Image (cartoon, rainbow, N blue to C red):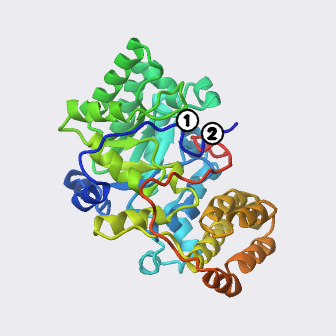
């Protein structure tokens, strides 16, 4: 099952000012900082099934991501103590790849906080129990997924299914908020509707309003419908109008964030209080560093070959701790081919990563394409990290669906 991993005929979008000017002006919303200390910039790494595990998150953290969301965790998996429960424990992962002690890990940059544990399910009571488990694992935020558009998820009455059943959605929101300690914020992930019919638009409004009425701190709204899935451009105009109608509510935006400039385009055009970076950060943790560079008034620059090498080696090491050596080779191939697009010989690097199955093969590809000889060759040919072009779309990325398939139990 595929999903578009490059822009889809994105329409022209009118901005009020140059992107660089917006970047210099925006700051973290003080309401968010008050409840989630450390969430100090208006962007974050979204939950991406099959991608945003602890390894990807730790890499993003070291490049400026202020906040991350886990993959969607199934309530029953959490209740039954399945693999997803261990795999997503942020402190356990950091301790195993670091020095053991939390403070030492943080000093070494291995700190997966603040973080939202995203939960998905179909029964209010089970969603409540699963949320209690996540709260006990040290998550700063509990995020309820009512957005996933994958058909097998919807068939099981989870995720985006609830946008067509607002009464059931409200029951889940109420149950989760009641179960989670008042000191831990709850948030919700939505899409703009189940489909484009008037009745579904009304259903969205009912769920959206209920979230804030029951004390949810923010809603992250993806600007496509559930039926639209990931096809075609997102409707940023919907986000703009939603924010304009609810100026007192923190609203985060999601959809069509492909480059660092898109983060600030969405903030300018839509007025959202933070931007969810999803497909645009796969194989591109530098998007967070670039966003902070732009906020500081500097031009965003791509990664050097040496920086790419360091990230690839770290990502492999983190992934091996989480998944074990036998699975890491296959798991990391999809990352390798995404990282390859930053390299001056992207096609050759991608080709070699596709063939990787073992740690030795992974290391050999990195030595061949990212070692000192490769760096010297690139330098001799005049290649150097470049400023990210404002009109540059993300390079085509082949790969699997990154929507919200539940990690295996």
Occupied quadrant, residue 78: top right
Secondary structure found at label 1 = loop
Are the two marked residues, 1 and 2, in contact with CB atoms closer than 8 angstroms? yes
Q: Is residue 142 above or below residue 62?
A: above
- Tell me if residue 367 comes above or below residue 145 in the rendering: below
Give percent across and percent down for residue 276. Answer: 41, 48
Residue 172 disc label: none
Report the residue marked by disc 2: 3
Q: Quadrant of the C terminus?
A: top right
Front residue of 383/21: it is: 383
Instruction: Name the one closer to the observer, 190 or 258.
Output: 258
Within 10 Å of the Cα at label 2, are there few (<14), some (14-19), or many (20+) other Cα atoms?
A: some
- Rendered residue at 77%/61% (across/down): 351
Residue at x 45% of width, y 29% of height: 124
Identify the disc placed on residue 230.
Answer: 1
Measuring from the top left, give residue 298's x and y in whole percent. 33, 71
């Amino acid at each position: 099952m595929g999903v578009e991993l490059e822009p889809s005929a994105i329409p022209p979008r009118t901005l009020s000012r140059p992107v660089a000017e917006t970047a210099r002006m925006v700051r973290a919303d003080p309401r968010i900082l008050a409840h989630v200390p450390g969430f100090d910039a208006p962007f974050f790494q979204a939950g991406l099934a099959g991608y945003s595990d602890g390894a990807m998150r730790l890499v993003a953290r070291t490049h400026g991501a202020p906040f991350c969301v886990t993959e969607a965790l199934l309530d029953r998996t959490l209740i039954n103590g399945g693999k997803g429960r261990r795999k997503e424990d942020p402190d356990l992962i950091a301790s195993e790849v670091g020095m053991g002690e939390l403070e030492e890990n943080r000093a070494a940059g291995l700190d997966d906080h603040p973080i939202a544990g995203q939960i998905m399910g179909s029964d209010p009571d089970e969603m409540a129990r699963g949320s209690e488990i996540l709260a006990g694992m040290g998550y700063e935020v509990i995020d309820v997924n009512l957005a996933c558009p994958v058909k097998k998820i919807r068939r099981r009455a989870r995720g985006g299914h609830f946008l067509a059943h607002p009464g059931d959605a409200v029951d889940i929101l109420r149950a989760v908020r009641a179960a989670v300690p008042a000191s831990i914020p709850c948030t919700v992930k939505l899409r703009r509707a189940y489909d484009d019919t008037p009745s579904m638009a009304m259903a969205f409004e009912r769920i959206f309003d209920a979230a804030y009425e029951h004390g949810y701190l923010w809603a992250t709204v993806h600007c496509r419908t559930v039926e639209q899935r990931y096809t075609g451009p997102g409707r940023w105009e919907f986000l703009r109008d939603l924010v304009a109608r609810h100026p007192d509510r923190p609203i985060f935006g999601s959809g069509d964030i492909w480059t660092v400039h898109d983060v600030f385009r969405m903030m300018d055009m839509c007025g959202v209080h933070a931007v969810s970076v999803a497909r645009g950060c796969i194989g591109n943790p530098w998007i967070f560093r670039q966003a902070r560079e732009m906020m500081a008034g500097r031009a965003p620059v791509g990664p050097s070959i040496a920086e790419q090498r360091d990230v690839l080696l770290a990502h492999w090491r983190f992934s091996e701790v989480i998944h074990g050596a036998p699975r890491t080779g296959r798991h990391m191939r999809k990352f390798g081919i995404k990282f390859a697009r930053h390299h001056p010989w992207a096609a050759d690097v991608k080709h070699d990563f596709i063939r990787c199955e073992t740690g030795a093969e992974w290391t050999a590809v990195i030595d061949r394409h990212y070692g000192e000889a490769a760096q010297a060759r690139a330098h001799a040919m005049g290649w150097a990290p470049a400023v990210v072009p404002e009109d540059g779309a993300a390079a085509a990325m082949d790969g699997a669906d990154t929507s919200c398939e539940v990690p295996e139990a």
